Amino acid sequence: MSDLNRLLDSNKAWAAERVKEDPRYFARLAEIQQPEFLWIGCSDSRVAANVITGTQPGEIFVHRNIANMVVHTDLNVLSVIEYAVNVLHVKHVIVCGHYGCGGVRAAAGHQSLGLINNWLRNIEDVFRFHHHELMSISDENQRINRLVELNVEEQVLNLAKTSIIQKAWKHHQRPTLHGWVYGLDTGILKPLCRVEDESVLDPVSRYDNL
């Protein structure tokens, strides 16, 4: 059996099991999508939002990219945020990184990796912002894991800087932003930060005409 056939056969078995447990399972999923959460996570195959949170399809709206970035020139992530906040009316946006992230490790290195270097440049800036703290950590793995945490916190701040989030705060008092990090070796999610309004922002990052 090819790897692709294995995936298709597993899908059929999974679908049959869901229908056996609940005959209207897929009918309900097809009717409406009302998640309370937007998850912005890493593309790493070991960090699947539904799996590690024990949630069902339809409960979390998901966007994933290398190193869980919120980049202001990335129309993909901005479109996801816009849809989740203004159409789905999510109550929470979670940026979730993970310890041992290959993207974060690559950003802290000095190798040319092609196109990906342009994406990782944003994490290099995070390293620069916190250079003194990070270079005081002698163990490389611990330094990378601390950079993972700092990167998550920076991406939450980037979220707060968007006009999408600030407008939703002004008119709807939502969503709450969260920064989490996942331990591959423990399976546990660690909350790092929580932001509920624009008070976290410098005045220059605030919009007045929303």
Image (spheres, rainbow, N blue to C red):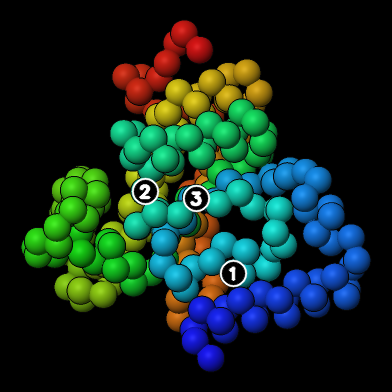
Q: Residues within 10 Å of mark 2 (few under 14, many from 20)?
A: many
Residue 148 percent location from the top left of the image: 33, 60
- Image point 77% across, 43% down: which residue? 32
Q: Name the secondary structure under disc 2.
A: loop
Q: Name the secondary structure under disc 1.
A: helix
Tell me the quarter of the picture where residue 25 sits. bottom right
C-alpha gap between disc 2 and disc 3: 10 Å
Query: 132 above or below 53?
Result: above
Q: Residues within 10 Å of mark 1 (few under 14, many from 20)?
A: few
Along the viewing direction, whichever of 121 and 125 lies nearer the viewer: 121
Mark count? 3
The three-letter amino acid code for the residue at tag 2 is: Met
Please tell me whether mark 2 or mark 3 is closer to you in this view.
3
Q: Which mark is residue 144?
A: none
The residue labelled by disc 1 is 52
The three-letter amino acid code for the residue at tag 1 is: Ile
Residue 105 percent location from the top left of the image: 24, 66
Along the viewing direction, whichever of 41 and 14 lies nearer the viewer: 14
Residue 59 percent location from the top left of the image: 70, 53
Q: Name the secondary structure under disc 3.
A: strand
The residue labelled by disc 3 is 63
N-terminal-most mark, 2 or 3: 3
N-terminal-most mark, 1 or 3: 1
- Image point 80% across, 75% down: which residue? 16
Q: Residues within 10 Å of mark 3 (few under 14, many from 20)?
A: some
N-terminal-most mark, 2 or 1: 1
Q: From this viewpoint, which residue is outermost toward the right?
A: 23
Can residue 58 be seen? yes
- Image point 41% across, 67% down: which residue? 44
Residue 41 percent location from the top left of the image: 46, 56
The residue labelled by disc 2 is 69
